[in-house]
Amino acid sequence: MKTLISKEIARLRKFGFTVYNFNLNKSLPSGLKNFVDHLIISERYLIFVEVKIGKDKLNPEQIDLMNLISFLGIRNKSIHYQLLTGIKQTKDFVSAVLSKKLK
């Protein structure tokens, strides 16, 4: 399921978005531990995306990061944090990004 979600998010590249995928099967440098799974950048948005499927839950460090990014988003409407838990939600999210209706 995470692979399908990653592919759906990667579709944004076709529309000029820069998409970084940190949700890889190899270990990340220690400085990126607990960082989000995807970072999406455009002229309009800076979006941090975390993917959690099934029983997978946010750990305390991820919750702290989510709260920090969400707080920054209150002050700057271009910054967003998105927690995705399924493919339909991901498709809706990608559609909202493309239609510039991300809330």
Image (spheres, rainbow, N blue to C red):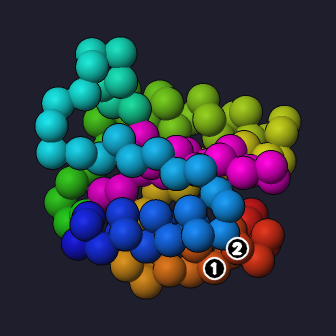
Q: Position of residue 87 (x, y in %)?
A: 37, 79
User: Residue furthest toward the top?
Assistant: 31
Secondary structure of the residue carrying numbered label 1: helix
Per the model, the C-alpha gap separating discs 2 and 1 is 5 Å
User: Residue furthest toward the bottom?
Assistant: 88
Q: Residue placed at 43% from the left, 73% from the top?
A: 8
Q: Position of residue 44 (x, y in %)?
A: 81, 52
Q: Residue placed at 60% from the left, 29% from the top?
A: 68
Q: Residue placed at 56% from the left, 35% from the top?
A: 67
Q: Position of residue 94 (x, y in %)?
A: 58, 73
Q: Is residue 93 among what the camera can see? A: no
Q: Is residue 68 among what the camera can see? A: yes
Q: Which residues are magenta?
A: 36-52
Location of the N terminus (image quadrant): bottom left
In depth, the one of 96 and 16 nearer the eye is 16
**Is the residue under label 1 in contact with that under label 2 (CB below 8 Å)?**
yes
Number of numbered tags placed on the structure image: 2
Q: Is residue 50 inside the magenta stretch?
A: yes
Q: Which mark is residue 98?
A: 2
Name the residue tied to disc 1.
Answer: 95
Disc 2 marks which amino acid? Leu
Q: Is residue 77 inside the magenta stretch?
A: no
The answer to which quarter of the image holds residue 100 is bottom right
Disc 1 marks which amino acid? Ser
Q: Residue placed at 36% from the left, 63% from the top?
A: 6
In depth, the one of 61 and 87 nearer the eye is 87
Task: Tell whether 12 sits left or right of 2.
Answer: right
Tag 2: Cα neighbours inside 10 Å, few (<14), some, or many (≥20)? few
Location of the C terminus (image quadrant): bottom right
Q: Which mark is residue 67?
A: none
Secondary structure of the residue carrying numbered label 2: helix
Q: Position of residue 64 (x, y in %)?
A: 47, 28
